[in-house]
Amino acid sequence: MNELFARDRREIAPGAVHLPDWLGAEAQRHLVESCRTWAAPPAGLREVLLPGGGAMTARQFCLGWHWYPYGYARTAVDGDGQPVKPMPGELAELGRRAAEEALGEAPAEPYDIALINHYGPGAHMGMHQDRDERSPAPVVSLSLGDTCVFRFGNTETRARPYTDIELRSGDLFVFGGPARYAYHGVPRTDPGSAPPSLGLSGRLNITLRVSGYDA
Ligand SMILES: O=C(O)CCC(=O)C(=O)O
Ligand SMILES: [Fe+2]
């Protein structure tokens, strides 16, 4: 890669690790292709309406369990009402391997949720905690396409202290342990910065989670 400085593995906070370039070009292309299939109806890509009346600027779909503000269901209760597609075995395995490589240990329960967000130009995500899962297993985050600024904060407030890092296509970020319930968000993306060979416009983020719910 044409880099002046190598991007090294970095612990952002205890339990929160950034592994740059974790997915190779071929693995990224394969995931983008798969996402195109998974994003189709039923229970496909949708606009997420928030209880306050607004809408999320990133569009989203889910696999395994359907997330809505604020809980999980087996059907797209805030979409077309159809059953959510099953969690693909390859994503469950990717989550397990990511947690193991980032934190040295994979959770006992399988990764059974994938939440996939697409960020077009101007899309962002406000500071929030991922806390609708019953399991405290680490959250695994994979980035594809446009580069973004990812803001990783603290467990107490949406405000400082936080650390801004750049997540690029292929990067892995895992947060578990003492960082599992830290506030985080995406203040901005850099439209047009995706690797041209990926054939993706915008940014895709895949988070893999353990529900802790009975099948
Ligand atoms: O897009 C990202 O990098 C973060 C997504 C996120 O925080 C979420 O889906 O809960
Ligand atoms: Fe999140």
Image (cartoon, rainbow, N blue to C red):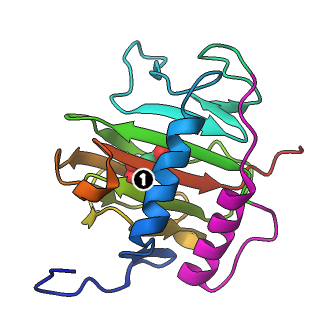
Asked which quadrant contains residue 173, the reply is bottom left
The amino acid pointed to by label 1 is Tyr
At x 28%, y 41%, the residue is 201
Residue at the extreme right of the image, as rendered: 214
Asked whether residue 163 appears in the rendered view, the answer is: no
Give the image location of residue 9, x and y in percent: 37, 84
The residue located at (79%, 52%) in the rendering is 212
When the figure is inspected, residue 46 is found, relative to residue 174, above or below; the finding is above
Residue at left offset 70%, top offset 66%: 93
Determine which residue is flagged by label 1: 183
- Where residue 19 sits, quadrant-wise, is bottom left
Membership of 98 in magenta stretch: yes
Q: Is residue 98 visible?
A: yes
Q: Is residue 30 magenta?
A: no
Q: Quadrant of the N terminus?
A: bottom left
Range drawn in magenta = 83-110
For label 1, the SS is: loop
Q: Is residue 156 placed above or below 176 in the rendered structure?
A: above
Query: Relative to the observer, which residue lies in front, 88 or 154?
Result: 88
Q: Residue at x 40, y 61 (%)?
A: 154
Q: Nearer the viewer, residue 152 or 61?
A: 61
Eyeballing the image, is 172 above or below 213? below
| x then y, percent, for residue 143 | 40, 58
- Residue 68 position, x and y percent, is 59, 28
